[in-house]
Image: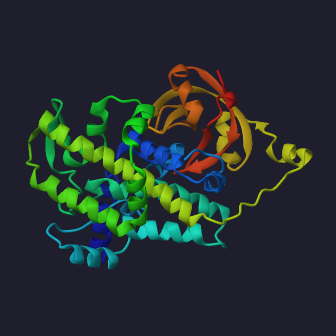
Amino acid sequence: MKKRTILNWCMALAAFGLISWGFKGHRAVATIAQKHLNANIAYVASAYLKGEQMEDVSTWADENRDLKTAPWHYINLPLGLTRDAFVKAVQESDNNVYTAILKTEATLKDANASAEAKNEAMKYLIHLVGDAHQPMHVSRKEDKGGNTIQLRFDNKGTNLHSLWDSKLIDKEGLSQEDIVKTYDVATPVEIRKWQSDGPIEWLWESYQITTDLYANAKPGQNIDDVYYQKYIPVVRKRIDQAGIRLAGELNRLLAGQKVKTTVVPATAASSVTSPVTVKLEEIKTYTGKMIIVSGKVFSSRDIGSMTLVNLGAAYPNQLLTIALKGKAKELSSQIEGKTVTVEGEVIEYKGKPEIIITDPGKIKF
C-alpha cells in the first residue's frame, strides 16, 4: 500500500508539467469565448468571476493545481481505439479532464451552489475546455502526454507536448490581440455545429489529431517549416473551437440564472474594508485582513498571467509575495530592488502570506 501511495504521488507530480496551450493560447480561448457570450450571460459570468475578466483567470487552474486536481487537465488513452471503444473508455473513466468538465458544469447549474463554488467552477471550466482541445492532453500515459518525446524546434531542444502547448503559437509572433483576430474566424454554420457538440466529441477530435502526431513524431526529430505550415492551421482551429464551445456551454449553463447583488451602506463598507498599517515582519498574523505594508523587493518572477514579487527576502525565504495581475502586472519591470507600499487583503498560499494586486493604484514605490 505504501509503495502504491508513493507511486501515485510521483505520477501526480509528473502531471504538473502538463500545461495546455500556455499563456497565450488559454487567454485567446477565453477572449474568443467572451466575444460570443450572450449579453445577459456575460453579466452573470462576470458576477460569478467577481468582476475579473475571463482571459485573466484562464490560467488560474494551472497556477493553483495540486495533487488532487492535476489529473483534471488531461486524459490518458491507448492509441488505436475505434470511436465506440473511445467513447466507452472515456465514459467509464474517472478523475480526468472529461469528468472534471462534467463536475464544474454541474456546479454552475446547481441553484444551491455557493458563490465561492461557482467562482471556482467558472475558472476551472474556462481552462479545462481549452485543455480538452489541446491534442496532447488526450494522449498516452507511457510518454506523459508527449513530454518524454524529445524534439528540436528553431534550433532548440523541446518535446512534443511543449511544442503544442506554446512553441507553434509563439513562432507566429502575434500579439494577444492579433492572435484573437487571426484565430476567431468561424462562420455562423461552424459556430452552430461546434456548439452542438459535447465534451466527448471535443476529446475525440483531439484523439484523432494526437494519433496523427504520434505517427509523425520521431525522437530527436528536427521540426521544420513543412511541419509548422501543416499544423499551425490545426492549432488555430482548435483554439477557435475551444473559445466558441466555451461560449456555447456558458450560454446554456447560465441561461435564466439570477445574480444577487447586495448594497452595503457606505459607513459599513468603510468599517469593513478600512486597511490597517502593519510591519512586514508581522504579516503572517494578518491573514484575511485588509492591510497596508511596506517592504523591499528582493526578487520577482513572471509566470505568464501574473508576476510574483518577493518582499523581505528572495524566494523561497520571502516574508510576503505580491501577485501582480491585470493592469498591475504592467508595473513588473519598474519595481525590482525598490521599496514598495501595497494595500490589499492578506491570503495564505502554500503556507506563505500573499497579496493579489490588480489595481496599479494599490502599490506605490
In the image, farthest residue toward the front: 189
Count the marks: how many?
0
Quadrant assignment, res 198: bottom left
Identify the image quadrant of the C terminus. Answer: top right
Q: Is 315 positioned to the left or the right of 151 in the image? A: right
Looking at the picture, how far across and down is residue 107, in whole percent? 56, 69
Looking at the picture, how far across and down is residue 69, in whole percent? 43, 62
Q: Is 79 positioned to the left or the right of 102 in the image? A: left
Residue at x-position 8% and y-position 41%: 221
Residue at x-position 30% and y-position 38%: 169
Q: Nearer the viewer, residue 262 or 292?
A: 262
Identify the image quadrant of the N terminus. Answer: bottom left
Residue at x-position 29% and y-position 31%: 172
Name the image colouring. Answer: rainbow
Q: Nearer the viewer, residue 148 or 262?
A: 262
Q: Nearer the viewer, residue 135 or 187?
A: 187
Residue 121 visible from this viewpoint: no
Residue at x-position 20% and y-position 53%: 146
Looking at the picture, how far across and down is residue 329, in whole percent? 54, 31
Residue 342 visible from this viewpoint: yes
Q: Is 99 positioned to the left or the right of 52 in the image? A: left
Q: Is 128 positioned to the left or the right of 147 in the image? A: right
Q: Nearer the viewer, residue 276 or 210?
A: 210
Quadrant assignment, res 236: top left
Looking at the picture, how far across and down is residue 324, in whole percent? 56, 35
